[in-house]
Image (tube, rainbow, N blue to C red):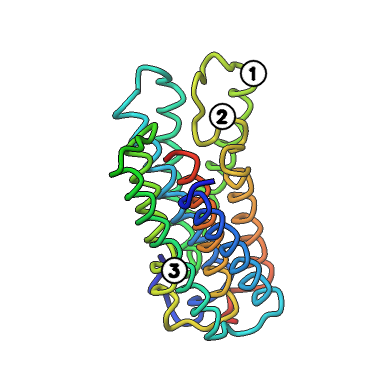
């Protein structure tokens, strides 16, 4: 298993963890805690590391099946979580945790897709 | 991603629906654009239906925003149209597979997206139904 695949697995696993934590917040009807934002930003850092790794592998000669799909996934990977966190910046309600859960789940799915198409 | 709607409708389950719709606008839109501009001849029906799906998600996003602000009429129509689209394309992809040499967003009821395309309009309609029975969407 190469380094990028390993990072993608870590991103997907961590995204699943953030999704579960955020979904629990919705289930418990609790206001969104600050630490959930921190978990989200940590996921974003991991996603950026994965994107850089995938771009490095591409520049080193690894050709994806479809370049446009590959770059689209990379864009989505790094944009989803900041968009969700920024949109919900002033909303600490229960359902804002649901937004974080959806964004984290999508980030995890995109990380797996990056691994598949790169 | 979210509406600048009145304070009473600012928060609620529609926020999650809006997020998922936004993700699908991105996913279906990007997918359909790539399909149409790079290999439209391979599966014209399937790729055209992907464009329709992307357009439906854009309309659905606006419809839910409007519904959260108190005007549910457009959302009712759009969610039923979306559900009809998923069911019709899902059935066609199983009954006439020759029309779908490559998958569209709604092929096999959205199995390529974990069946979320089939669940999404149902969840939206449930949200609308709950809003109708329990009054305007309240903040949490």
**Chain name for mark 3:** A
Q: For this rendering, which residue is in front, B25 or A116?
A: A116
For disc 3, the marked residue is A84
Q: For this rendering, which residue is in front, A74 or A92?
A: A74
Nearer to us: label 3 or label 1: 3
Location of the C terminus of chain A by quadrant is top left
x and y percentages locating residue A34 in the rendered image: 52, 86
User: Would you call the spot at circle 3 few (<14 residues within 10 Å), some (14-19), or many (20 or more)?
Assistant: many
**Chain name for mark 1:** B
For disc 2, the marked residue is B89
Q: In this view, does B126 lie above or below B57?
A: below
Residues flagged by tags 2 and 1 on a common chain: yes
x and y percentages locating residue A42 in the rendered image: 47, 73
x and y percentages locating residue B48 in the rendered image: 40, 28
Nearer to us: label 3 or label 2: 3
Q: Quadrant of residue B37?
A: top left
Q: In this view, does B63 lie above or below B11?
A: above
Q: Residue at x 41, y 69 (%)?
A: B3
Q: Residue at x 54, y 46 (%)?
A: A1
CB within 8 Å, label 3 to label 1:
no
Q: Which residue is drawn at 53% across and 42% down?
A: B82
CB within 8 Å, label 3 to label 2:
no
For disc 1, the marked residue is B95
Q: In this view, does B87 lie above or below A110?
A: above
**Chain name for mark 2:** B
Q: Which residue is drawn at 64% across and 48% down?
A: B119
Q: How far apart are marks 2 and 1 (CA)?
A: 10 Å
Q: For this rendering, which residue is in front, A58 or A78?
A: A58
């Amino acid at each position: 298993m190469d380094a990028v695949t390993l990072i993608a697995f870590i991103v997907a696993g961590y995204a699943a963890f953030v999704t579960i934590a955020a979904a629990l917040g919705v289930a418990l009807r609790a206001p969104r805690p600050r630490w959930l934002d921190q978990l989200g930003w940590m996921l974003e850092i991991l996603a950026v590391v994965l994107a850089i790794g995938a771009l490095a592998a591409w520049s080193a000669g690894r050709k994806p099946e479809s370049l446009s799909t590959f770059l689209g996934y990379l864009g989505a990977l790094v944009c989803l979580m900041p968009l969700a966190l920024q949109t919900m910046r002033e909303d600490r309600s229960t359902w804002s945790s649901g937004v974080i859960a959806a964004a984290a789940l999508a980030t995890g799915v995109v990380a797996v897709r990056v691994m598949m198409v790169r | 991603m979210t509406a600048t709607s009145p304070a009473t409708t600012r928060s609620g389950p529609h926020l999650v629906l809006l997020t998922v719709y936004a993700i699908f606008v991105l996913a279906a839109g990007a997918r359909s654009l790539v399909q149409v501009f790079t290999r439209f001849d391979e599966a014209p029906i399937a790729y055209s239906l992907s464009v329709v799906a992307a357009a439906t998600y854009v309309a659905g996003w606006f419809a839910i925003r409007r519904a959260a602000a108190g005007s549910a009429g457009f959302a009712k129509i759009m969610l039923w149209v979306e559900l009809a689209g998923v069911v019709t394309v899902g059935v066609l992809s199983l009954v006439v597979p020759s029309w779908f040499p490559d998958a569209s967003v709604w092929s096999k009821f959205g199995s390529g997206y974990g069946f979320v395309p089939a669940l999404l309009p149902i969840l939206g309609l449930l949200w609308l139904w709950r809003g109708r029975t329990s009054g305007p969407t309240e903040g949490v």
